[in-house]
DNA sequence: AAGAAGTCTGAGCGCGTTCACAGGAAAGTC
DNA sequence: GACTTTCCTGTGAACGCGCTCAGACTTCTT
């Protein structure tokens, strides 16, 4: 087994964002470096040799595209996951997915970002894991973005999908409403934790048509994916 | 085995609270420091280098979130367990579970706080122990928040769960009703100690379905988890 | 521009949880 | 064995948590 940790370089000038991604990615077992501006980022790619770069499009010195252009000129082929604001720049980012790059729009949710990173790493062969998550007769395939139970395909909205993914990654563990909110919803979500209840309800309605209940309520604590006793 | 004691910094301006936590945590084998305000707390983090900080959100000088912000700017990554009042602060707690931080609402029960601290320390690798407690054919898993006897899952209410946890942590020892009340119930509980009897009764009813009695009454003193002779 | 899909809020309802209390059982005492 | 003390457990009331649904609002499609 070749287990050098996959290396991720996070480039953003907002410290809350880098802190957020840094802690989440570390927790996921990545070797993380952080950079706050474009020039430093280019230098770090050289020294750190990351497997993927998380790159904000709006940086104080160089813009994200310029950074990538220079990296490519230097011969680096590291794939980039852009973090773009949801405005004009979004158009510029389109079409990048050809070179193996991809993008998510700010504000993102962590599950979203992590899923994308894993897709990139898998396509590169850096991350050995499969694109499928399994629990009981449930199957979630990130590459195809398809969920099945007992063979049947289940149609899920984006939020439902992210929620189920988070539950499956943490199968067996109890997750508090706030934990769920922090990982599944966009980081700037201002509403109340009761949305989680609504979406758990949606998920149950769709999942439990095809078998026994899988999402357990732990009263006063949260929810947990578990096979009923 | 590397057993330097885990270090905990407790920050609160109410002396009853710090006293309470100080003694309980010491008794649990932690190396504890106490601080009564924000500025001092920041200084202590630097000097004492704690593994976790117990931080009241409402402090006379700086508010808890501001303290964390400053700590992060200083590069400290120490996880924080917030002690918050159950109202307004609830909203501001967003994003906390990402950096490994968490919160409990005042008034808390000691078992609650200690369980949370252990979760944080385990996740950090500071506390080697597992998330499971065992006694005879009983098993309590804090991660999944599940209790089993002889393999069967037992559904417990929050209070029942905390009570059983306290009994298991102190297996073999006799615990008085007041000790139990002090650790399992919220510290401002005003009722009578007879509740304990009620909950012992609930627990016995659920546990003893699956095997011989485990909770022994020690007349005139209290209760004890013990395998019948 | 209109329709469809997705998201989120708020309210109502049901049920589990918590706790006091009281009558009866068990243990200990003389 | 009778008496006292301690403990057990059923009943019931108040409360709060969690589930669900309708509807407003936003965003994506065509």
Image (cartoon, coloured by chain):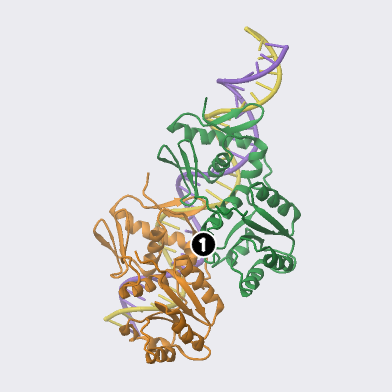
Chain colours: A orange, B green, C purple, D yellow
Which picture quadrant has residue A167?
A: bottom left
Where in the figure is residue D18, as x and y percent of width and height? Answer: 47, 53
The answer to whether residue A100 is above or below residue B225 is below
Which residue reaches farthest front? B1
- A208 with respect to B111 (left or right): left
Which residue reaches farthest left? A151
- Residue designated by label 1: A178
Where in the figure is residue C7, as x and y percent of width and height? Answer: 43, 70
Q: Nearer the viewer, residue B20 or A79?
A: A79
Q: Nearer the viewer, residue A45 or B182?
A: A45
Count up the numbered dots: 1
Q: Nearer the viewer, residue A154 or A145?
A: A145
Where in the figure is residue B138, as x and y percent of width and height? Answer: 47, 38
Q: Residues within 10 Å of mark 1 (few under 14, many from 20)?
A: many
Which picture quadrant has residue B180?
A: top right
The answer to whether residue A204 is above or below residue A27 is above
Write down the chain letter for disc 1: A
Q: Nearer the viewer, residue A142 or C18?
A: A142
> Do we see residue B193 in this rendering?
no
- A120 with respect to B100 (left or right): left
Which residue: 53% across, 60% down? Answer: B124
Which residue: 41% across, 37% down? Answer: B150
Query: Is label 1 in a helix, a strand or a loop?
Result: helix
Where in the figure is residue B55, as x and y percent of width and height? Answer: 66, 61
The answer to whether residue B140 is above or below residue B197 is below
> Do we see residue B103 in this rendering?
yes
């Amino acid at each position: 087994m070749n287990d050098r940790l996959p290396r991720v370089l996070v480039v953003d000038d907002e410290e809350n964002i880098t802190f957020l991604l840094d802690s989440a990615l570390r927790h996921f077992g990545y070797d993380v470096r952080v950079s706050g501006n474009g020039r430093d980022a280019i230098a770090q790619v050289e020294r750190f040799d990351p497997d993927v770069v998380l790159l904000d499009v709006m940086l104080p010195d160089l813009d994200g595209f310029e950074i990538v252009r220079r990296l490519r000129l230097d011969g680096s082929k590291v794939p980039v996951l852009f973090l773009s604001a949801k405005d004009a720049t979004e158009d510029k980012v389109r079409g990048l997915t050809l070179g193996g790059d991809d993008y998510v729009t700010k504000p993102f949710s962590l599950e979203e970002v992590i899923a994308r990173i894993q897709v990139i790493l898998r396509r590169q062969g850096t991350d050995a894991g499969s694109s499928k998550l399994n629990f009981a007769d449930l199957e979630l395939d990130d590459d195809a973005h398809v969920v099945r139970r007992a063979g049947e395909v289940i149609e899920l909205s984006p939020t439902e999908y992210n929620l189920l993914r988070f539950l499956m990654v943490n199968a067996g563990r109890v997750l508090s409403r706030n934990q769920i909110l922090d990982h599944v919803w966009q980081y700037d979500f201002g509403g109340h934790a009761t949305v989680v209840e609504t979406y758990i309800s949606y998920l149950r309605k769709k999942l439990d048509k095809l078998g026994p209940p899988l999402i357990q309520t732990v009263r006063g604590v949260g929810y947990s994916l578990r096979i009923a006793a």
